[in-house]
Amino acid sequence: MLKLIKKVLKTGEATVAYPAEPLAMVANFRGKPEYNAQQCIACGACANACPSNALTMTTAEAGDSVRWSLFLGRCIFCARCEEVCPTAAISLSPAFELSVWKKEDLYETADFPVCACRQCGKPYAVQKEIDFALSLLQENGALSDSQLAARRVQYETCPECKKMHGLTSSDRIDIGRHLVTEAC
């Protein structure tokens, strides 16, 4: 028995004193999703990719806003949301201590205003998403300032009004797939 105690004392501690000192996390550890609402364009890619439905996008009854919400109680920390986000607004952090006193503390939400159509006034798209698309066109130098203003009118018009008012020429719209065969 003394030999065993002597060997245990010589070996030292085999476990980590976790509550007393923090755990060191590995580089690829997938912990709590961190969300940056300023960077988000509310495209819904993360909600579509979430296999556990922890992320949802819902429209307000009035239609004037879209709510992004994350329920950490359903999250399986798969990092699909991080992979598909075009603006890197969501990323998994090394935080893993998620215990709370109230279930409501496991929810995280953000509201985004919806753009109303310039022609009919009906809400149809998130304003930040439209602004993001236009800023990409401007960054790439594809449009001048006057072209950007004209494009903004086009982007802020719903598809039904575009068809009715002819804002998009029908010859530019190609619906369907075309197979082209080459002669051998």
Image: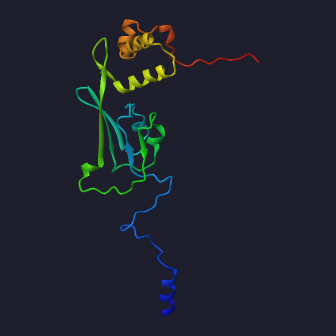
Q: Nearer the viewer, residue 175 or 113?
A: 113
Residue 50 is situated, as x and y percent measured from the top left of the image, at 42, 42
Q: Residue 164 in the image: state x and y as whole percent.
A: 36, 8
Q: Is residue 81 above or below residue 18?
A: above
Residue ID at (40%, 31%): 43
Choose top left, top right, bottom left or bottom right for residue 21.
Answer: bottom left
Residue 1 shows in this picture? no
Residue lying at 30% horizontally and 25% vertically, measured from the top left: 114
From the top left corner, tell me how far across and down residue 67 is, in percent: 30, 34
For the C terminus, which image quadrant? top right
- Please state which of residues 104 and 51 is positioned toward the viewer in this rendering: 104
**Foreground of the two, 89 or 108:** 89
115 to 151, vertically: above or below: below
Q: Position of residue 157 (x, y in %)?
A: 36, 15
Say which residue appears at 43% left-offset and 13% top-offset: 145
The tally of labels here is 0
Q: Is residue 70 left or right of residue 138?
A: left
Res. 75 visible in picture: yes
Q: Give the residue displayed 31% in from the left and 57% down from the top.
A: 99
Taking the view exactly as shown, the residue that stands out farthest to the bottom is 2
Q: Is residue 14 above or below residue 4?
A: above
Colour mode of the rendering: rainbow
